[in-house]
Every structure is written in structure tokens, then in C-alpha cells.
Image (cartoon, rainbow, N blue to C red):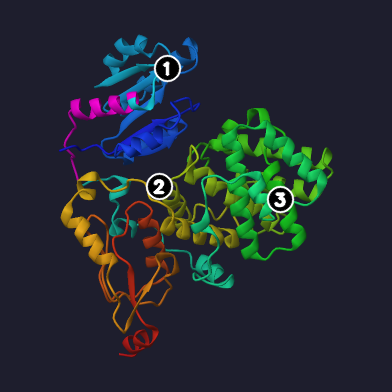
Amino acid sequence: MSKVHDTLLYLPVGELPAGLPEALQKADYSTNIVHDIADLLEMVDVLDHPILITESGKDEDESIDRVKALITQQSLKEVPLVLIGREADGFEEILDEYFKLSVTLNTPCNTQDVVNAVKFLERSYSWPAPETAPTSISNITLEELTETESVPEQIFHEIEQFGGVERKIGGADLKHRFTLDELDSMGILPSDDTLRSGINDVYVTVRPWVQDHLCRTAYILNKFNDVLEVSQEEHENARAACFLLPCAFTKYATAPLRKNYLQSAHGARQEISTKLKDSALHIMSKLSSPQVGEIVAGAAKLIDGEGDPTSADIPLTSSSLVAAELIDRVSFQSGYWNTRGAHFLLKEAKSGGLQNLIHPKAIACMIKFLSEAVTNLPLPFLTHRTFRDDPDLQRAAQEHQAYEPEENEKIVPLDSLEPGMRLSKPIYAYDGRKILSGAVMLDQDLIWRLWQLSAVRPMNSPMIVEKESNQGESQDE
């Protein structure tokens, strides 16, 4: 029986065959995409039995540097490798020396060639037996999550201020691609002609993935500012600031806008901050828009740790911009929604890692948006195929989903759970493991943990809670 379901795509440049993630998913593999070596090493630690797929580079010098970077990482030696590139087979000898098992594919090649190589490695590799209980991120249990800090009460208080968990703020409607025309029809582009011209100059200059990044960020930011009820003028300025982020470095936008700086050295933050400050100066001088430039400058200060997000010196819209941009930066990989990125952000926020970066009001928007997205957007293959193909588990899933609540019960979506609700039925993961028993009273901490856990471990059952009248009776008893 196969143990592999995870493929790890390392794309420093992004030159693997087009459509490869979709082809791998169709062949029943999950795809995890990273763009720098730090993220690669982290994912190797959390995935069970990953197969690494990467590109060798455009020319001989770049290929040599790329292969050197791989063979010097001790933790990669036990990972089976598919190396793709022009004359990739020239590295077979050195790869055989440093990797336990590897395959090279010369370009041009197609997606089926890569899938076949992955299947070959899956059949041929001797997978080590686990030394301890699984530590894969997809097998995190609720008990393991209890080791993190409690949910900051301030964040749930802020959620209550903008309407509570029942208010939907757009996470369920997030798409992997918005066009500029779509956003314009939604009223998200600014009305000022000078700013629109500046936005168009940026849009036609940057690469397609940067266009998508800016458009998705603009959609998220607009939802946040609707919730926070900023003034119409602030709304307008924030919309412009979002698209003009890379206006001073459009030719070099790939690196600063792609890196997950929360997991990188401080130098990564400084690099991004410096670029954004250049953009802020460009906006203030060339586009004569000091207020828009101030929002971008505020975001630069927050990212570099130079400013207090709660200070009056930094606009709230700067925090909203950082929060929206960070969601897209971390939760989208090569243009596709990635629930593991959402899990990372929920975990980072829960541990207090965002409090010095983003205003609490913007963090509250971020958490609510992510909870909606995790609940409603399509999930990748997070569950091992051993469980997905088990007929008993499939039957149990269907029974859970078909459950009709009794008179004293109601079904509540995961993203609409509120503190004080009492479960009347247990919550199960798809693999059959019980997450929470029935009769548990939900608090802020438990709800956050459920949001976080559902990002990496699909829930198998609807959330069944007692109706309010029965909750009150139970509490009185």
C-alpha cells in the first residue's frame, strides 16, 4: 500500500511545466509549493514522505548553484527528488551521490512525464518507518494545539464590534483570480484619474502572478475596510495604495512580493520595507498623492518593525493593507488557495506573532476572513488516500453529512460558532478520529482551535449545537 500522497514543489523561479499542480492533484497527489529554501526545509519537516520536485535553472551556472544549494541541505538527503531542466541528466552522478533516490527529466517535458517520474519514485523508494507518532501538519490533533497560547480575548472582542462571527466578510467568495475589469465593476478601483493611470502603468508592467496577487489583495482589503467602516476618502486611498505597492520596483517585483517574511530572517522584512518606502516616495512625488503614499509608508514601517500598529501615526488602513497582503502572500501559492498557509497565519496570530505587526482590528478581520475561507473554499488532498479510499470512512462521512438535527438542535457553520454554544454531538475528522466530545461548551479558545485545525484536518461532521433555550437550561442546572 502506498505511503505517499505529498509532493513538494520547490520553485525559486517558477519554470516547471504549466498545469503541473493540477496534473499531480488529478493523479491523487497533494501539492505543496514553496519558493525559497527556508520554506522548503520547513515543509520537509512537517510532511509525511514527501517527494521533492524542482527545476535546475535557466543556464549552466544557475543550475550548478541550484544543485549545490540542494545537496548541502542535510535534511533533504532522505527525500526522493525529481530534477527538471535543460540537460538535467548531467547532474545524475552527483545526485546519486547525495540523494538516496533521484530522477532527472530534461526539458522540454510535459506534466505526464513528471507524474510518471513521481509514480516511479513512489514505487521504488524504501520509506523509513516512523520513529514516533506522526508529526505531519495534516495529522495535528486538537490536543496538540492546546499547547499554544490562548486566543487573545481582544481579537474576539474586536470581531464582536464589527458584527460578530455571524457577519460574513467575504472569505467564502475569494477566488484565485480577479481581473482589473472585475474589480472596477465592483467599485474597488479608485475614481481619481491620476491614480487610475498610475495603477494601469503598474498592472501592465508586472508579471501575471503579480497582477493576480495585487487583485486578490485589493479584494480582501476592500472587504476589511468595509467591515472597519473607514471613511470614503480612506477607502479610496487604500484601494490605490494596494495597487501601487510595487510602483517603484515593478521590474524587480517577484522577490519582494513572494517571500513569507514571517518565517524569514529580518533582512527579508527590511528588503520589502525598503522597496515599499521607495514606492511611497514615488506616489507622493510623481503621483502627487501624499495620503496614498502615507498608507504605503505606514505598511513599510509595520513590516520592518519601526512603528506601533496602534499608534495614531500609522493609519489603520496601513494595518488592513498588511493583513490583506499577508493573507494572499502566505495562503496562495502559484495562484492557488493553500489551506496550510491559512493554518500558519491562524497559528501565528494565536501565538501573538502578529500583534506588533498589525492593528488588533485588522487582525480580527484577518481571522474572520480566514475562518470563512477555510470553511468554504475547496480543500486540497489533506487526508491520506488510505483514509480517503476507505469505504467505511466514506460511509461514515455521508452519514454525518446527512444527519437531521433534532428539535432541540441546530446546525451551525464552523465559521459561525460563538462562545457559549454547547455541542450536542461529537465532532469528527474525516479519518474517523474524534476531535471534540458532545456536551462541550465552546469558548473563544476552542473555536479558534477548530478554525485552525480544520485548515489541515478536514472535519467530517456538521457542527450540531443545542438551541439557545436548551443552552440556558443546561447552564442553570
**Tag in front: 3 or 1:** 1
Q: Nearer the viewer, mark 3 or mark 2?
A: 3
Q: Nearer the viewer, mark 1 or mark 2?
A: 1
- Where, by quadrant of the figure, is residue 283 drawn? top right
- Report x, y in % for residue 380: 36, 46
* Residue at numbered disc 1: 108
Residue at label 2?
340
- Report the magenta stretch's main SS: helix
* Mark 3 burial class by Cα count in 10 Å: few <14, some 14-19, many 20+: many
Q: Disc 3 residue type?
A: Leu
* Mark 1 and mark 2: Cα distance apart in space: 31 Å
Residue at x-position 75% and y-position 61%: 232
- Which residue is label 3 attached to? 189
- Marks 3 and 2 sit apart, C-alpha to C-alpha, by 30 Å
- Amino acid residing under circle 1: Pro
Q: Quadrant of the N terminus?
A: top left
- Identify the residue shown where x is 43% and y is 45%: 338
Mark 1–mark 2 CB contact (< 8 Å): no
Q: Is residue 454 left or right of residue 175?
A: left
Query: Height in image: 192 above or below 462?
Result: above
Residue 219 lies, with reference to residue 273, above or below; the image says below
Q: Nearer the viewer, residue 339 or 293?
A: 339
The image quarter in which residue 442 lies:
bottom left
